[in-house]
Image (cartoon, helix red, strand yellow):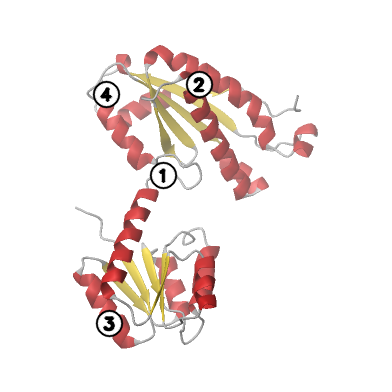
């Protein structure tokens, strides 16, 4: 069954709000409406919509303030916004686009143009939801499909790599720093694939802090060794040099890596493949000491 997208319409004119609600419900969307800016913020936090169609002039706070509040929260920061307003001034449009709006339409508007804008925005957001916003790598929804295809095949190897205690690192040094670590590890893996892998190798996430690499058994051990070597050298650079030099790295991050191969099967599900790789995990010795 195709996904039913959720649209929030923030519009204080009841006739316009009802017209938009009826139209988009007839198109198969799930639609919520709000006439007040603070109600819109509350609804977004309770049930994150796939898209917000946002008026600017509202009874309490204006539409720009609504979007600013949504951008402050990780949960709602990436919700696409289409401004639909009677404000025609160029400066108003620029203000909306600076906030990251995907479109700025003025009233009176063409309903077919709005419908196509909504469709295109949701198509793009559906694609971006399949990749991690931090690393740009495919998420579990995609990598699970890869593993499904392996169940009935032979001559493959899955390398599973997990970063442990990333949450503790983020709490100490900030979530931006934690994201930088995940991004760096993803780039290290991708670089190793470029060096000794092949175009058929596949790299993606299991969770935010764990990865799988689908490759061939003939090069799996070489890839594993190269990853261990490069991660060992990189890890001390993830920490502030003052903490590294003073030996004050608290609950340092660790890396585990395991391998599952077709030859050790059979496997009846993607989870069985993943479990086999995870059960074979060994901790990689990574450096948290002084930098060379």
Is the C-beta separation of discs 3 and 4 under 8 Å?
Answer: no
Q: Nearer the viewer, residue 89 or 224?
A: 89
Q: Which callout, 1 or 4, points at the residue further toward the start of the chain?
A: 1
User: Left or right: where does residue 47 sit relative to residue 284?
Assistant: left
Q: Which residue is mark 1?
A: 131
Indicate the position of residue 122 as horizontal and vertical percent values: 33, 59
Q: Earlier in the sequence, mark 4 or mark 2?
A: 2
Secondary structure under tag 2 reads helix
Determine the residue positioned at 47% across, 78% down: 38
Q: Tell me the CA gap for discs 4 and 2.
A: 30 Å
Above or below, comparing residue 226 to residue 160 in the picture: above
Q: Earlier in the sequence, mark 3 or mark 1?
A: 3
Q: Nearer the viewer, mark 4 or mark 2?
A: 2
The nearer-to-camera label among 3 and 4 is 3
Residue under numbered circle 2: 195
Question: Mark 3 sits on what residue?
Answer: 18
Above or below, 211 relative to 106: above
The CA distance from mark 2 to mark 1 is: 23 Å
Q: Is residue 287 above or below residue 107?
A: above
Measured Cα–Cα span from mark 3 to mark 2: 57 Å
How far apart, in angstroms, are the residues tagged by discs 3 and 1? 35 Å
| Residue labelled with disc 4 | 267
Give the number of the disc on residue 105: none
Few, some or many C-alpha atoms within 10 Å of disc 2 (few <14, some 14-19, many ≥20)?
few
Which quadrant would residue 123 be assigned to in this image? bottom left
Answer yes or no: is residue 281 visible.
Answer: no
| Disc 3 to disc 4, C-alpha distance | 53 Å
- Is 43 in front, or is 112? 112
């Amino acid at each position: 069954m195709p996904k039913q997208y959720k649209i929030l319409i923030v519009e204080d004119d009841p006739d316009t709000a009802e017209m938009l609600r009826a139209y988009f419900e007839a198109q198969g969307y799930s639609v919520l409406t709000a006439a007040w800016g603070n109600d819109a913020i509350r609804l977004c936090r309770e049930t994150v919509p796939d898209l917000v169609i946002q008026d600017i002039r509202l009874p309490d706070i204006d539409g720009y303030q609504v979007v600013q509040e949504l951008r402050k929260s990780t949960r709602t920061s990436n919700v696409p916004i289409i401004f639909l307003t009677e404000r025609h001034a160029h400066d108003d449009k620029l203000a909306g686009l600076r906030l990251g709006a995907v479109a700025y339409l003025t009233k009176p508007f063409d309903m077919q143009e709005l419908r196509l804008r909504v469709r295109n925005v949701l198509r793009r957001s559906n694609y971006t939801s399949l990749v991690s916003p931090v690393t740009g790598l495919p998420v579990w929804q995609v990598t699970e499909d890869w593993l499904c295809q392996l169940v009935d095949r032979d001559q493959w190897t899955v390398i599973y790599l997990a970063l442990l205690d990333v949450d503790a690192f983020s709490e100490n040094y900030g979530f931006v720093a934690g994201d930088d670590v995940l991004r760096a590890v993803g780039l290290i893996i991708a670089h190793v694939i470029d060096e000794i892998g092949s175009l058929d190798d596949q790299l993606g996430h299991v969770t935010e802090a764990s990865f799988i690499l689908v490759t061939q058994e003939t090069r799996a051990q070489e890839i594993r060794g190269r990853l261990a070597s490069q991660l060992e050298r990189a890890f001390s650079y993830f920490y502030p040099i003052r903490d590294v030099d003073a030996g004050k790295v608290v609950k340092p991050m660790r890396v585990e890596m395991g391998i599952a191969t077709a030859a050790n099967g059979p496997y009846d599900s993607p989870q069985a493949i993943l479990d086999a790789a995870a059960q074979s995990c060994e901790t990689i010795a990574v450096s948290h000491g002084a930098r060379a």
